[in-house]
Image (cartoon, coloured by chain):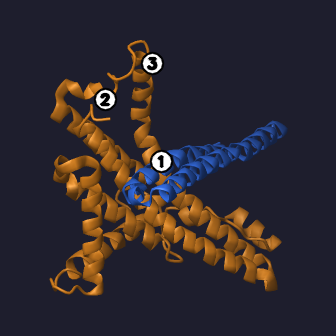
Amino acid sequence: MAVEGDLVQMGALIGAGLACTGMGGAAVGVGHVVGNYLSGALRNPAAAAGQTATMFIGIAFAEALGIFSFLVALLLMYAQ
Amino acid sequence: MSAEAEAAGSGFNIHPMDQFVVKPLFGHGDILWYTPTNVTLWMGITVLAIIALLVLGTRGRAVVPSRSQSIAESIYVFVHKMLEDIAGKEGLKYFPYIFTLFIFILVANILGLIPGAFTTTSHIAVTAVMAMAVFTTVTLIGFYKNGIGFLGLFWISSAPLVLRPILALIEIISYFVRPVSHSIRLAGNMMAGHAVIKVFAGFAGALGVFSVFPIVAIMAVYGLEMLVVCIQAYVFAILTCVYLNDALHPGGH
């Protein structure tokens, strides 16, 4: 039984580590949003100020998915 | 407790999640619904800080504002403009709600950055209540203002007819995921940021002379966290505005 428990624990921890790779995807997404905002803003600085809020909404949506992977990792580690 | 003793023996003492434990303020009894805990304490401090800033700050009503009056007025104008830009004139009716959410989250987040403080917004229980309140309010406002026409939010009339049922399904799923992502975004960001600082603090304790590197890193992360807490309060408020706009103008996108 103890060995089985250790196996489950090991699988959960490996899974938690794997879940953290999802954060890389969120990082790519956030970088993409801000990079495109910046390239657009440098082309037309007059329109930039009006779009800052949209950029933050975009960041929030992209980041939420990274936070989901963090949540999965936490659940695997602590909610056994 | 046993894990703590074990780690202390090895000289490498990192417990990044210990700071989020809810403890009773007095004694070590069970936590019931009326037990004053550290969450209660820090929520109370948050509310008192907000009252101090807004009531005492603007008491002078000076034409040339003092520092605290200037802060209070800037926050007020900032939220007012954000709401008007996103939800339009009709949205301004709900300004007190958005402003309350924004300033509570902002002050709770900033107070949580004080070393030794408890971050109330790092608990999903706290943020989920706020997100569910937003979700319920927005849904009720949508049905109250538009009647059954609120369902037009899910039936996108500009899309081709074949695609509409599929899009409706996706829209419905995304609508019901809103309170989940809304609450977990805030709690997750707060929890992750504070845990990172604590991990670096653990390194500082274990490295002896070289602890200067983790301490510099803590200062950098702390600066980043200062930015993140403000942005997360802003994001929570702005998403509430976006959801409110969906409820007030369901066909407007």
Alpha carbon separation for disc pair 2 and 1 = 20 Å
Judge whether residue B12 can be spotted in this image.
yes
Alpha carbon separation for disc pair 2 and 3 = 14 Å
Alpha carbon separation for disc pair 3 and 1 = 23 Å
Q: Quadrant of residue B20?
A: bottom right
Residue B153, numbered circle: 2
Q: Position of residue A21 (x, y in %)?
A: 70, 45
Label the orange chain with its letter: B
Q: Is residue B26 above or below residue B239?
A: below
2 and 1 marks in contact (CB < 8 Å) = no
**Chain containing the residue with disc 1:** A
Q: Residue at x 30, y 77 (%)?
A: B71
Q: Residue at x 45, y 54 (%)?
A: A56
Q: Quadrant of residue B232?
A: bottom left
Q: Position of residue B167 (x, y in %)?
A: 43, 22
- In the image, B198: left or right of B209? left
Q: Secondary structure at mark 2?
A: helix
Label the blue chain with its letter: A
Relative depth, front residue between A19 and A54: A54
Q: Looking at this rendering, what residue extends furthest in the right direction?
A: A3
